[in-house]
Image (tube, rainbow, N blue to C red):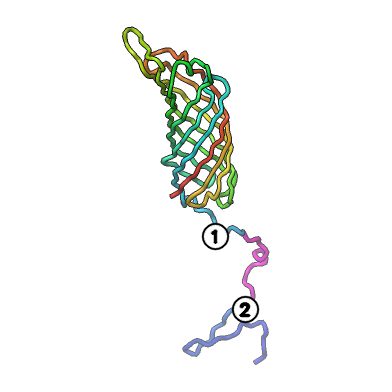
Amino acid sequence: MTNNPAAAPENSDSAGATTNAPGPYNTYLPEEQNQPVDPTLGAEYDKHEFGWMMSLDIRHAETFGGNIERLTHITLVPIGHEEEEFSYGLFVGVANVEYESGSTPDLLTDDPLIFEAGLAVRSYFNSPRNGLSPYLGCSLAYQLLLWDYRSPVIVDGNTYDHNALSGVEGTLSVGITTLRDSHICAFGEIGVGGTVFICDTWQGFRNDLFDDFAFAFVRGGITFKF
């Protein structure tokens, strides 16, 4: 028998038969050998991992126009959800209100507070795998401003010690958050917004106390994911 170097080696099985076994040469097609390898292959972000979340934050706002000078909000997002490119959450909050000194509300009312509830949305600019993720945020909220009168108001024999007024607030912001792919992350943002009061007071009086206003704000908080 003559030697054939191109022939495949023969192996014997347990019954003594011989089989042709493939040699140690590369079986990939030429065009497949030089294909680039994706470095993120096998490490894709699980969109459902840590998807549900809750957060707590503090927001300080300085106003422009109107007779409210500044507000300090404490806001809770009891339930929210985050995807790879965006997140949304329902929030409730309370805000301490500071009047402009000498304004009509400052002279006639006391102990003002705002209660609010609304929806906040974020759009992220990069992957959750990055240590820092910048985002664009917006929110829309219903607000209820409550106050006490410094002196009781008597109208048609009825005495009123307190009152309330409904409004709508909208905000637009930019921010940055840390470690989006972990159970706990911190965030901070700056933004602008405005509040419009939408009707008469709850006691049926025409609103001649509070003006609509715009504001700029800073916010910081922490998010828990589960």
Say which of marks 1 and 2 sits in front. Answer: 1
Q: For residue 42, which numbered disc appears in the image?
A: 1
In front: 41, or 50? 50
- Identity of the residue furthest to the left in this view: 157
Q: Residue at x 31, y 8 (%)?
A: 157
Q: Residue at x 39, y 15 (%)?
A: 151
Q: Which residue in the protein does label 2 denote?
A: 24
> How many numbered dots are placed on residues in this image?
2
Amino acid type at circle 1 is Gly
> Going by the image, does 62 lie left or right of 158?
right
The majority secondary structure of the magenta stretch comes to: loop
Residue 26 on the magenta span: yes
- Identity of the residue furthest to the top in this view: 156
Q: Residue at x 38, y 12 (%)?
A: 153
Residue range of the region highlighted in magenta in the rendering: 25-37
Amino acid type at circle 2 is Pro
Q: In terms of sequence position, does the residue under pointer 1 or pointer 2 come before the other? A: 2
Instruction: Give the SS element for disc 2.
Output: loop
Write down the quadrant of residue 217 in the picture.
top right
- The quarter of the image holding the N terminus is bottom right
